[in-house]
Image (cartoon, helix red, strand yellow):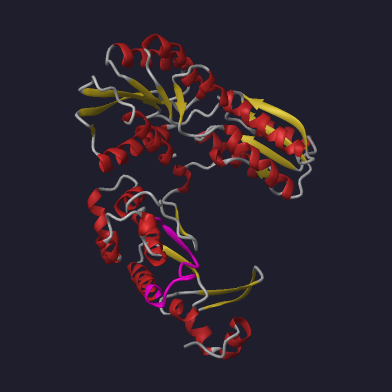
């Protein structure tokens, strides 16, 4: 979500009019209520852009004015947009979480010649309502179509679809159905629920009675998504073997608590952002001074903080990926073969950093690694997997002392 918001801010400020001393941007979104996380993400993306680039474009100062729209309310959305354009004199509108709210604003755009940047609302038809509308986020067709192949590859031939009855839900239903039937599957029934639905038991019974072996669901991120998933579990659908398929909307950040930090084998950095800008992405609202934590861990990143991501070596990119993830303060850090293909000296630096992290006890570290000895130096528990199955589990000392297990499981004559 935040990368889309950053793109939206960039689109606005790069198209500024020369006549304005102050460029005003009106942002409408849910900053309170059950969907407040989404509005906070809008603001976090804008704040991140302003922190990196400042609030001036040439001689012009950019001012962002926020208006709260806690839930879908097209009439209120239109009223807020009119107030921003007429009273606040904004030159741009942005934000909008729900499709009906965005649709309600489009008639105003032509009258005031005011561009609108959509930061979330995902119905594909929005951009057809006015040439002044641009989207930086996504459409539900994009996120729902691939799920059909996932369902087919999972061996499911019959699916029932359940969606919230508004623009994105209808798009999701149609996208999944078209793609699933193209794969040879069958959608046996399509259920559309009012947005206000919070009792899902009758829906779950219809799913059971349909004879489908899978359910495709789309609901807007928020409390109802958690309720739907709980109903799926509590009404026995999971135990009955009915598989659950959905795009990412059913998992929102607030449901993940402190979250999982993931450092993959691949060097996942933003190639055209500087080292410091890459690290800003990981701050998640923390003060800029927190960057020193990353620089203390990997001093060479501070030396190269103005370099672009694609100007770093593979080892430095992995340090950057690791530091950016840790700045988010995850409760669990998953390191997926982070040393693969790196020079020995870089491997030593990374493993030393992991060992220091383990000493703090601030997070659980799950390290997937073939360099077993360096991992044993700070691990509390060891698990050996063979062809995806548990082959051995115990403490590092137990493994080190059991040479038969070492030779049998790891294919080496000893640990050294």
Where's residue 124, x and y in %? 56, 26
Where's residue 289, x and y in %? 22, 52
Residue lying farthest top? 111
Mark yes or no: residue 295 visible: yes
Where's residue 154, x and y in %? 72, 50
Instruction: Give me the residue at 48% from left, 84% from top.
Output: 397
Where's residue 101, x and y in %? 47, 20
**Left or right of residue 241: residue 400:** left
Considering depth in this image, is 358 or 130 the residue closer to the camera?
130
Considering depth in this image, is 195 or 198 the residue closer to the camera?
195
Magenta-tinted stretch: 329-347
Q: Quadrant of residue 405?
A: bottom right
Q: Is residue 32 above or below residue 392?
A: above
The number of callouts visible is 0
Mark yes or no: residue 243 visible: no
Considering depth in this image, is 73 or 177 the residue closer to the camera?
177
**Left or right of residue 328: residue 382:** right
Q: Is residue 242 above or below residue 197?
A: below
Q: Is residue 403 magenta?
A: no
Q: Is residue 248 above or below residue 314?
A: above
**Left or right of residue 1: residue 215:** right
Instruction: Give me the residue at 40% from left, 9% from top.
Output: 111
Q: Is residue 343 magenta?
A: yes
Instruction: Give me the residue at 73% from left, 35% from top.
Output: 160
Quadrant assignment for the N terminus: top left
Q: Quadrant of residue 375?
A: bottom left
């Amino acid at each position: 979500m935040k990368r889309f918001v950053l793109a939206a801010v960039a689109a606005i400020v790069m198209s500024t009019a020369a006549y304005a001393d102050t460029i005003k941007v009106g942002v409408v979104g849910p900053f309170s209520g059950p969907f407040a996380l989404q509005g906070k993400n809008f603001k976090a993306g804008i704040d991140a852009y302003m922190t990196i680039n400042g609030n001036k474009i040439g001689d012009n100062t950019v001012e962002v004015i926020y208006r709260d729209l806690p839930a879908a309310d097209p009439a209120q959305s239109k009223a807020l947009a009119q107030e921003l354009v007429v009273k606040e004199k904004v030159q741009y509108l942005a934000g909008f979480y729900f499709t009906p709210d965005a649709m309600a604003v489009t008639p105003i755009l032509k009258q005031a010649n005011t561009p609108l940047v959509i930061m979330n609302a995902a119905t594909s038809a929005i951009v057809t309502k006015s040439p002044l509308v641009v989207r930086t986020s996504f459409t539900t067709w994009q996120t729902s179509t691939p799920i059909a192949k996932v369902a087919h590859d999972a061996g499911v031939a019959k699916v029932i679809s359940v969606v919230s009855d508004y623009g994105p839900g209808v798009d999701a239903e149609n996208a999944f159905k078209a793609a699933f039937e193209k794969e040879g599957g069958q959608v046996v029934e399509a259920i559309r629920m009012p947005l206000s639905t919070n009792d899902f038991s009758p829906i779950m019974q219809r799913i059971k009675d349909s004879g489908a072996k899978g359910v495709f669901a789309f609901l807007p991120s928020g409390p109802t998504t958690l309720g739907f998933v709980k109903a799926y579990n509590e009404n026995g659908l999971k135990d009955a073997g009915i598989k659950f398929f959905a795009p990412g909307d059913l998992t929102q950040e607030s449901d993940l608590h402190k979250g999982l930090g993931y450092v993959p084998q691949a060097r996942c950095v933003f190639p055209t952002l500087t080292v410091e800008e890459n690290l800003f992405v990981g701050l998640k609202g923390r003060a800029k001074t927190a960057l020193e934590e990353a620089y203390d861990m990997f001093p060479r990143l501070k030396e190269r903080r103005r370099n672009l991501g694609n100007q770093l070596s593979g080892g430095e990119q992995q340090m950057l990926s690791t530091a950016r993830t840790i700045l988010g303060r995850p409760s669990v850090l998953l390191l997926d073969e982070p040393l693969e293909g790196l020079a020995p000296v870089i491997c030593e630096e990374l493993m030393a950093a992991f060992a220091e992290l383990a000493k703090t006890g601030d997070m659980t570290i799950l390290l997937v690694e073939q360099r077993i000895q360096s991992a044993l130096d700070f691990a509390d528990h060891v698990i050996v997997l063979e062809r995806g199955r548990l082959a051995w589990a115990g403490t590092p000392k137990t493994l080190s002392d059991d040479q038969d297990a070492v030779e049998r499981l790891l294919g080496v004559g000893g640990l050294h």
